[in-house]
Image: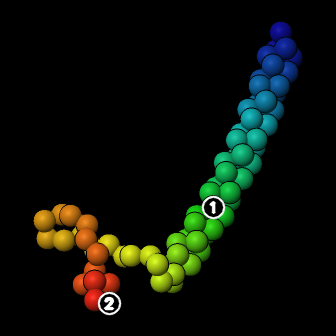
Amino acid sequence: MVLRIVIFVAILGLIFLGVRRIWRDLTGNMRQVEAEERAQRRARDLADRKRTDVVELRRDADGTYRPDDKSDRR
């Protein structure tokens, strides 16, 4: 009887450790993919800022987004 309990606990422990390791691997991979996407998005945004046809909007005192004063002068 005790041997059955020990075997049952050992099997449950191995299953728990396996599931835990799979969970850690998956979350680690997801974090890595999210970090790569964030870096790509950041690089794209920085490249877009350098373009001349992009108008940068500033939040005004009343909460409305308007073009910056510098961009109005042409």
Pinpoint residue 73: horizontal percent, then vertical percent.
28, 89
Determine the residue positioned at 51% across, 81% down. 51
Determine the residue positioned at 39% across, 76% down. 55
Residue 58 appears left or right of 45: left
Circle 1 sits in a helix, a strand or a loop, which is it? helix
* Residue nearer the viewer, 52 or 46: 52
Q: Quadrant of the N terminus?
A: top right
Determine the residue positioned at 72% across, 53% down. 29
* Residue nearer the viewer, 49 or 16: 49
Classify 3 as above or below 47. above
Circle 2 sits in a helix, a strand or a loop, which is it? loop
Q: Quadrant of the C terminus?
A: bottom left
* Residue nearer the viewer, 56 or 21: 56
Amino acid at pointer 2: Arg
Identify residue for label 1: 37
The numbered mark, 2 or 1, whose residue comes first in the sequence reads 1
Residue 39 appears left or right of 20: left
Count neighbours of disc 1 (C-alpha within 10 A) and say few if under 14, some if 14 to 19, many if 20 or more: few
Between the C-alphas of marks 2 and 1, the distance is 36 Å
Question: Could you say which quadrant of the image residue 70 lies in?
Answer: bottom left
Pinpoint residue 44: horizontal percent, then vertical percent.
58, 71
Residue 24 appears left or right of 65: right
Q: Residue furthest top?
A: 1
Circle on res. 8: none
Amino acid at pointer 1: Glu
Identify residue for label 2: 74
Classify 64 as above or below 14. below
